[in-house]
């Protein structure tokens, strides 16, 4: 599908007025056509940065999820998320570096590797300037890192996402 056709589809989906949990399973694959990614997730957050809900195309097993919450604090997510909310640009990217020791190594081993996450493109989605949450697009170990062009493509559709995900 051409980039303009993807944008039209994205606008149409965002204009349906569906509640976000019903919209995300259809919306994320279209976003991944606009910005190629292996999978994606959306993390709903309150104004304090606490995650209140999520929709992800790939999830850890229930046992791994339980361990994740025990071992890897939501505080880390909250700190990173609030930094992104305060940043001048709502879009940022990160490529993971191998960390052989410590908590970062455990996070990579227990969360990132099983989900095949090496590169992430983040977007803070807002509705009327109020942050709703974080969109995360992922690429795996063998994929290229996200580029400035990918950031620009995502920036161009964030307003549609904000209007749609506020429902």
Image (tube, helix red, strand yellow):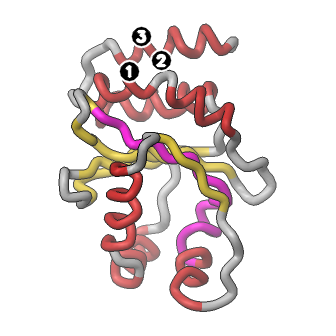
Question: In front: 64, or 87?
Answer: 87
What's the CA distance linking mark 2 and mark 1?
A: 8 Å
Circle 3 is placed at which residue position? Answer: 12
Residue for point 26% across, 22% down: 18
Q: Nearer the viewer, mark 2 or mark 1?
A: 1
Residue 84 x, y percent position in the rendering: 41, 52
Residue for point 35% across, 66% down: 79
Q: Which residues are magenta?
A: 110-126
Q: Nearer the viewer, mark 1 or mark 3?
A: 1
Graded by Cα atoms within 10 Å as few (under 14), some (14 to 19) or many (20 or more), the crowding at tag 1 reads some
Quadrant assignment, res 33:
top right
Asked if labels 1 and 2 touch by Cβ distance under 8 angstroms, the answer is: yes
Question: Would residue 27 be counted in the magenta stretch?
Answer: no
What's the CA distance linking mark 3 and mark 2?
A: 5 Å
Give the mark count.
Answer: 3
Taking the view exactly as shown, the residue that stands out farthest to the front is 88
Quadrant assignment, res 2:
top right
Asked if labels 2 and 3 touch by Cβ distance under 8 angstroms, the answer is: yes
Q: Secondary structure at mark 1?
A: helix
Quadrant assignment, res 25:
top left
Circle 1 is placed at which residue position? Answer: 160
Graded by Cα atoms within 10 Å as few (under 14), some (14 to 19) or many (20 or more), the crowding at tag 3 reads few
Between discs 1 and 3, the one toward the N terminus: 3
Circle 2 is placed at which residue position? Answer: 10
Residue for point 38% across, 72% down: 76
């Amino acid at each position: 599908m051409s980039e303009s056709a993807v944008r039209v589809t994205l606008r149409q989906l965002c204009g349906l007025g569906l509640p976000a949990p019903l919209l995300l399973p259809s919306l994320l694959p279209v976003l991944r056509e606009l910005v190629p990614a292996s999978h994606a997730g959306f993390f709903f957050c309150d104004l304090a940065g606490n995650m209140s809900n999520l929709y992800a195309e790939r999830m850890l097993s229930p046992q791994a999820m339980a361990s994740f919450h025990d071992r890897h604090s939501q505080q880390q997510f909250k700190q990173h998320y609030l930094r992104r909310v305060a940043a001048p640009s709502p879009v940022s990217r990160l490529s993971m570096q191998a960390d052989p020791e410590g908590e970062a190594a455990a996070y990579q081993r227990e969360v990132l590797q099983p989900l095949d996450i090496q590169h992430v493109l983040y977007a803070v989605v807002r509705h009327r300037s109020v942050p709703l949450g974080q969109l995360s697009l992922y690429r795996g170990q063998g994929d290229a890192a996200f580029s400035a062009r990918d950031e620009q493509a995502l920036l161009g559709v964030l307003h549609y996402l904000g209007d749609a995900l506020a429902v």
